[in-house]
Amino acid sequence: MKNQIYLRRKNKLVVEKGQHELPVSYLAAALRNIECLGYTFSLELLERIRTLSEAEFFPLYSRVVTVLKEMVGASRKYKPMYPNFPKQVMEASEGELYLLTIIHYLTLQLPVHEVKKRLPLLRESRLKVIHLGTDEELLQTGMDLLRAKSSLSPQDKEDLAVLFAEYEGIAEALPKEIPHKENAAVAASILLRADKLPPRFFATYCKTATDVLRLAVALSDGDVSLATPAKFRKFSRAERRLLLRLLEACPNLAEDMLRYKGRWIRLGEILHPFEYKDRYPQAAEAFDILRNNRRLETFNSKVELALARGEVHEAAHLLVQRPGEFARRLDHLLRLAEDGGEVLRLFAQVAPSVSTPVLLQALNHFAKREAYGKWRTFFPKGEVAKVQTIANELPQLAEDIRASAARICREALLERFSALPSLGKVYIDPRLQEQLVPFSQRSASKALRTIVRGSRLPIPDGSTIRFFTWWKEGLVNNVPTGRVDVDLSAVLYDADWKYMEHISYTNLRSAKYRACHSGDIVQAPNGACEFIDVDIESVRKYGGRYVVMSLNSFTSQPYCDLPECYAGWMIRSEPESGEIFEPQTVQDKVDIASRSTICIPVILDLAERQVIWTDVALRSHPLYVNNVEGNRSGMEWMGRALTTLVKPTLYELFSLHAQARGTLVERAEDADTIFSMNEGITPYDLEKIMADFL
């Protein structure tokens, strides 16, 4: 299990040195087989594997191949409706396509076609290298996840659970600080279940009522972001006493509990705090205040009252007690204040106490406040990846005030970073200007490569984009899914986001562009697949720029209720050569498991030849049925939002670190520290970025 995580996260393996000499023929065959999946071994790893016996080698090789197949989607069989896709679809008559589709809808059987022999795939050279790693580095990856100053993805949490179970003495290896409260709750719940929780853990990481609520939610497998209510499980007496004991030690208990009043009342019905009122009187009193609606003046009510009275400076003086809240409200205070200088003076006093992620976002906001354009885009917290776009109606802010606010944030960050170890000579790849800072990964899907939503990656050389999806119906938690129909679509827009055409089950091929669909399959008892080919130059020739990849659950089951569903895309130079699904041409593969029925994994920018990583769920309710036509307006707004984001970039973050604790150089070979797309610290090293640079 450890190597599975290591291979997926870092393209590395832990292989203990053996005392044998493996026959070269075995190693050559293994290399040839994993090359078909798009991977190869480094020289160091090859030399280590050569020291293994046959009995040691074959289990390792089998596990590696199994994991790689799962990563790229090669563990499933692909049988599209038209097996000679794309040529078969492009050459068939309209009548033939229509008739075969109707027959499939009526019989639920795939039409029988002669499968023609395909030309072999042109040899691909874009192989990913698997390196030799160490147990220490893998364990450090887990500890970096805990040190992250951003929320973790579901996959991160699963990996932590495995690492905690695999490593003995994990309690001693825990970092001195777990800065993000959600991650502390997740770690506590995993450690409690594994009976590996250090004695002083809660005294260090669980200090407020909201921390305790997150722990109760984590133990109930709920959303620790608290964006959505959790269904609490029944706790044992020992667990109830633990939660009440933690509550008893929290300051401002009743006030903090009022933030999530309804959830605390429901949790109280399970904890029975009045049974222990003699032992935990403060906790019992707080629950009594909530249940009987007893009046309580809170910090936020004082701030809001001051603002309602127009006493902006009074509100600012109050917010000095809570620096993070001050930073989040700073723009609002500056717009209301007659003397913004006094507000900024107070904020400058507390800025060093504001967390790095909040400071960095405040810096970005004030530095780029005039660059928002007509719309502002937000990613609400929660376990479902959603995007909210609102009209930009921010009133003007005086230039000197805006610049001063940005300067205060920048200076606070530079001072903080300057206290960190020196980076020496630093090289920063300009392409990192296309990569966004990972502030929140809680809703990120498991993917072949994971980056931050809105970030851009280059499309490799090749003429054709091939989208794919595979899904299966069956039992989930012993409940039948019924018939499941997932529809793959591609929607084409021009540079101004004007609709041009779509390729879907309702339009299997374009009359203008070289683009086509492999056929609509409407059930998947043994798994089903769909493909779409889009020829890049044929779209650009007629002014097309953006291609939105969309998945719609036509039968309305949320993706989280399916046994399996994933999607991805390939780059193909000769779409008629090789198999329809060729693992080594897969660029991205994303597991679709969100609590939604509409998903947009990626958007292609053909003019810039870039992939925009989206991995979001569409919130709009479809018209009539859940297909691409019924969601066209929502997809347009989603596309506009994700292609005009004004967010902090990794280039900006690393530049601040370089300014504070290093010297910039122009060439990577001259650098002690490298930040780039494929060397040194890369955008894929999310846990290290979140732990060491935020």
Image: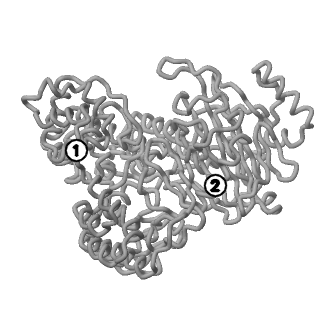
Secondary element under disc 2, as helix, strand or loop, is: helix
- Check the image and report above or below for 502 versus 475: below
Tell me which amino acid carries mark 2: Gly
Which residue sits at x=73%, y=33%? 80
Which residue sits at x=29%, y=40%? 214
Where the N terminus falls, by quadrant?
A: top left
Where the C terminus falls, by quadrant?
A: bottom left
Which residue sits at x=90%, y=32%? 96
| Tag in front: 2 or 1 | 1
Point out which mark residue 172 bears: none
Rendered image quadrant of residue 305: bottom left
Mark 1 is surrounded, within 10 Å at the Cα level, by few (under 14), some (14 to 19) or many (20 or more) other residues, namely few
In this figure, which colouring scheme has been used for the structure? one colour
Q: Is residue 674 visible?
A: no
Residue 24 place in picture, x, y as percent: 50, 45
Q: Which residue was labeled with disc 2?
A: 639
Q: Which residue was labeled with disc 1?
A: 296
Q: Is residue 70 visible?
A: yes
Tell me which amino acid carries mark 1: Leu
